[in-house]
Image (cartoon, coloured by chain):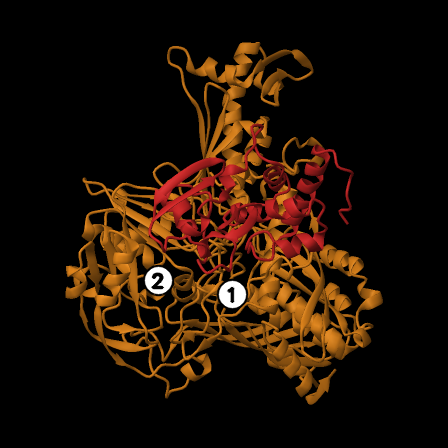
Chain colours: A red, B orange
Amino acid sequence: MRVALEINGDDYARDVEPDLTLLSFLRDVLGLTGTKWGCLTGDCGACTVLVDGKPVVSCLQLACQAQGREVTTVEGLETPGGLDEVQAAFVSNGATQCGFCTPGMVMSVEALLRTNPSPNEAEIREALAGNLCRCTGYSKIVDAVLQAAAERRSAVGSPAADVS
Amino acid sequence: MPAVRASELQVVGRRIPKLDAPEKVTGQIAYADDLRMSGLLEGAILRSPHPHARILSIDVSDAERLPGVRAVIHAGNVQQGCFGYGNDNVPLKGDKVRFIGDEVAAVAAVDEEVAKRALELIRVEYEVLPAVFDPFEALEDSSPSIHDELPDVDGNVSMRWDFDHGDVDAVADRAAAIVEGRYSAPQAAPAPIETHVVIASFSPSGHLTVWSPVHMVFMYRKALADVLGLDWRKITVIQPPVGGSFGGKIDIDTHDFIAVMLARHARRPVRLVMSREEEFIGTRTRQPIHFTLRTGADADGNLLFRDAEVVSDNGAYNAWGSHAMLVAMNTITSMYRVPNSRIRCAVVYTNKNYGGSVRGFGNPQATFAVEQQMEELADALGMDPMDLRLRNANQSGDVTPQGMEITSCGLSQCLDIVREQSGWDRRRGKMRDRHRGLGAAAFIHVGGGARIYGSDGCGAIVKVDESGQVTLISGSSELGQGSETALAMIVAEEMGVPIESVHVVNSNTDIKPWDVGVHASRTTFVAGNAARMAAAAARDKILEAAADLLDARAGDLRIREGVVEVAGEPDRQIEFGRAVRRRLLREEGSVVMATAFYDPPTHHQDKDYRGNISAAYGFGAHVAEVEVDPGTGMVRLLNLWTAHDVGRAINPMSCEGQIEGGAAMGVGLALSEELVMFDGQIAAPNFHDYGLPTAVDVPRTVVNLVETIDPLGPFGAKGVGEGGIIPPPAAIANAIADATGVRPREYPMRPWKVKHWIDSGERSHVVAGKEASEHG
């Protein structure tokens, strides 16, 4: 069947099997290997992408379900200046070690910050509870999110928010 | 090399982000499963559905006829030898299968779907044999014999680890208190988020290239050659970035051999990707170990002895998991000063998937027993457990009963720090009415190499090119732990160049020099010393050329930020690359390149398990605070304070990352992680049930880095990779005991177990003057 959708701002149309997952569509059909997989059962969150701005585990979503939607993957985050605030904060805070969970983790953070620009630590941990990280123990990821949120707020000129 | 004062350091000691982090946060970095290759076939493995069975016949004819299938292999049509410690394993089983998941046959096909359909067409006839899952039952004469083909295996005992020092029985008679008990650690999984992936490809001339995220890569290459009858001079192993290992990917695994055999049969490149289920059932695990331990002390709190009977349940094959006891033994004999010790350990075969070399390697298990008994003993003596620990703490200059020479040692300082930060003296034993408690545990672990193989060394090459760019070619590997960045920092520091100008190459056996591999928390220490030595030699060549250009003596020059200047005369300076060009761009020129090999002054343990196995030892202490719901047994970890003696923190941010991440794994072991098994079948081989800690399960860990400046470490650094995972199970058990008065006997300490201990009144078993009592 034919699926047409927007990925990272570009239009794509391909013929796909009806049971092809969005994950396989991204990785195997389009070669967008930035999105990782760790379980294919929706438990680890490594394959998280945004569909119309909402985080989904792409291993449990069919490609054809994304018909007409806007998909954002980790490849779509970079700004003309380089890394976006979340990516840059992950780098500077030591929030990535092996890096395999990182693209999915970063996408979950992007989704969180779109709905809650001033998350506190508990809200961050709750939002990331679907993304397993085996390396970091999560503290540096939380630090990175707090920093990215603060930077994004100051970039848009909003008043400093509570980061307690 | 001389000790360096912190104030003189330019790069070492700074919080420098990992060099590979930008590639990782953008998804650019290509892991093994991200590699794309022309003509690549997909492999799949047929695994045993029985825990113990004789293979009567294998019929692959239908599978071979399936369109799209390019190879079907089994023991009857491949050339393969034995592997693993004791040569107790073969890649494809021909006679017997010994656990559910054992490899029987494999296919390579044009895609994954065809490969899986082909597996369904392979017919294997089995004669099911009685199986044994409990290691204590496996020790009984009536137990089925799992490796009856191995002449040296006595019953199901694959190895014994027996140790004696002093006279335990004599000192036991004069002990003021003896505590005794059984402590058990479960089967757990390293569970990296990236499963194992391997790609094998033969060139038309017969050269084999393998892409595998392994981290003992030179021994991996040799094992491929030895087991499959290949010429090891015609094998290149490339290590793609590792998506987490924790020891799970340390050495060669069965599927690595299978991928190569498939590629050989199919004459095409073959990829084998473990599914998450296969990762749990078919790759190496952390072995369950059961300790029956006694510890005794005199009335002043001087430890007198430890006496341990240990059964290590390593499953169907040894791999290197049989050697987890090597590390566990170190902890029993040498965690604190213990003048007398006796260990009787059997490593036992059972019909389960088997143990490997997972982070901490036997130490979390042993520490769970040893450090619970420190608090039980203190309570029995009426002492504070921290005072008992400090009284018996290892100190610089000690030589332990196993001959471990303690040089730098910050154990007492670590204990003091977590005692202070946790409010131990005010709070321990005083929060039971609120169901809260504090518990501590410390650790000792190798931190300066570990001589288990012939070499404990690592090679390094430092090359400076005509642009001034510095390349470190290191034998060691990056697993995500940050060693690449630490090594680049060491080189930058030694040469006086900015970190940005140092590149690291470390992932191709054709290019990089020998290294044993990443294990035993050795990379910063061993590879770091090698890198520093090579960097110093390359720097001296540059100084020599610069002296010529600046008309100065080399001894009067110094390098800062990539500029060579005459000391005290900043006007007389040249840029780094110009000195290189001075050597290169002339008749009879030469390149700036230096090699080094560092093999630490360590020794193999002798047959009695004595010998200074590491050139430095890491220490640390944790205090956990928990709240226990007495109605459900639910344990909430509220706080975890940690202090680690890291020698010197080359990169404090990376050190914290290792400790925080290790501690989170330790918390997982303590409270949730277990491969629950029924009759050899892992009940739920998936992330949903396994119990990996999530962001809401792990509190923010307080990390203190204690710098003792090790005399042999690079800039004083010691290994830090494994320490974090070791204390949490013991510290959390002790905190549960403080909160409830009951004594945990095994981990993970899941609610129903804690509830059971509360309901049954499980207590410490104290023997004083040979009279048994129970202590609350």
Label placed on residue B591:
none
Q: Nearer the viewer, residue A7 or A109?
A: A7
Label placed on residue B84:
2
The kind of residue on which mark 1 rests is His
| Quadrant of the image containing the N terminus of chain B | top right
The kind of residue on which mark 2 rests is Gly
Query: Which numbered disc, 1 or 2, marks the residue closer to the eye?
Result: 1
Q: Residues within 10 Å of mark 2 (few under 14, many from 20)?
A: some
Kindly give the residue lying farthest to the bottom in the view shown: B771
Q: Is residue B428 left or right of residue A83?
A: right
Is residue B310 visible from the viewing direction of this image?
yes
| Quadrant of the image containing the C terminus of chain B | bottom right
Q: Is residue B431 above or below residue B444?
A: below
Label placed on residue B688:
1
Whole-percent x, y for residue A164 in the image: 77, 49
Whole-percent x, y for residue B136 in the image: 46, 82
Whole-percent x, y for residue B388 in the image: 74, 69
Q: Earlier in the sequence, mark 1 or mark 2?
A: 2
